[in-house]
């Protein structure tokens, strides 16, 4: 069965510092992978997606993620954190091999940006 | 271009009651998925509707049921409410027959509180 692990339920960075949020998946076949952001009292907004094209995926708000098959990882990065990046981030996988349509989400990482 | 809209935004019910939540998909989308997000957790897949049929279901009891209308809007019904049903309920829509690589677009959710 597919699963997603997000290491670190809380991450704090200083404004202007590198943001690194970790996501590992388990699958015998590379899945489709997504990163979403959730601001307080809001739904989820798509940041970026990997669907087997380029392994380095660029998203909105300066975020990007790199798909590494050998490490079964899809970590999210941003070179310079901004105060407005403070939110909860979710990694999700969509099962590609079985053709199922549901997303399996990680437990989320809450990002705090320090002034 | 209207995104995914959900109603109501907040709802308070007591144990044993029944509730109906509503969702209008993003324009051009034909597939609707429902997720339950408990406090501090990632969203959990409830079910997905396409062409007015339930196409896939997650690990939720039969107390959770749904419907999709010809205009692609959808309802989520929960019977015999339990305290554990308190959560944010998210609706997501997608296009292209909801295939695995199509990103799902989320509404802001309905916050359901059970007393």
Image (spheres, rainbow, N blue to C red):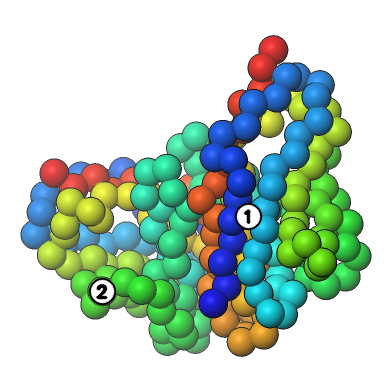
Looking at the image, the residue that sits furthest to the front is A70
Q: Quadrant of residue A99?
A: bottom right
The residue where tag 1 is placed is A91
The x, y position of residue A100, in whole percent, is 57, 82
The x, y position of residue A38, in whole percent, is 56, 42
Looking at the image, the residue that sits furthest to the left is B16
The residue under the point 75% across, 25% down is: A82
Q: Quadrant of residue B69?
A: bottom left
Q: Is residue A54 above or below residue B84?
A: below
Chain where mark 2 sits: B
The x, y position of residue A49, in whole percent, is 75, 60
Residue B99 shows in this picture:
yes
Q: How many marks?
A: 2
Q: Is residue A81 above or below residue A66?
A: above
Q: Are marks 2 and 1 on the same chain?
A: no
The x, y position of residue B43, in whole percent, is 46, 56
The residue under the point 21% across, 72% down is: B63
Residue B31 shows in this picture:
no
The residue under the point 85% across, 51% down is: A58
Disc 2 is placed on an element classified as loop
Mark 2 Cα shell of 10 Å, populated few (<14), some (14-19), many (≥20): few
Disc 1 is placed on an element classified as strand
Q: Is residue A58 above or below residue A82?
A: below
Give the spatial CA distance, label 2 vs label 1.
26 Å
Say the numbered circle drawn on residue B61. 2
Mark 1 Cα shell of 10 Å, populated few (<14), some (14-19), many (≥20): many
Chain where mark 1 sits: A
């Amino acid at each position: 069965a597919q699963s997603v692990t997000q290491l670190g339920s809380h991450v704090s960075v200083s404004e202007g510092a590198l943001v690194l949020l970790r996501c590992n998946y388990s699958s015998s076949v590379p899945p489709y992978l997504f990163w979403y952001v959730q601001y307080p009292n809001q739904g989820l907004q798509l940041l970026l997606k990997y669907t087997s094209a380029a392994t380095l995926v660029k998203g909105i708000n300066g975020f990007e993620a790199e798909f590494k098959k050998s490490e079964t990882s899809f970590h999210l990065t941003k070179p310079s954190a901004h105060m407005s990046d403070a939110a909860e981030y979710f990694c999700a996988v969509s099962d590609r091999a079985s053709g199922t349509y549901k997303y399996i989400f990680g437990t989320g990482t809450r990002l705090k940006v320090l002034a | 271009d209207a995104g995914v809209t959900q109603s109501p935004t907040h709802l308070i019910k007591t144990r044993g009651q029944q509730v109906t939540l509503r969702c209008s998909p993003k324009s051009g989308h034909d597939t609707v998925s429902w997720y339950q997000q408990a406090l501090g957790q990632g969203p959990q897949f409830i079910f997905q509707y396409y062409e007015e049929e339930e196409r896939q279901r997650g690990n939720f009891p039969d107390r959770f049921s749904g419907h999709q209308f010809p205009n692609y809007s959808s309802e989520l019904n929960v019977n015999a409410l339990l305290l554990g049903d308190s959560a944010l309920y998210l609706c997501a829509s997608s296009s292209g027959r909801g295939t695995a690589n199509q990103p799902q677009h989320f509404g802001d959710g309905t916050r359901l509180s059970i007393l």
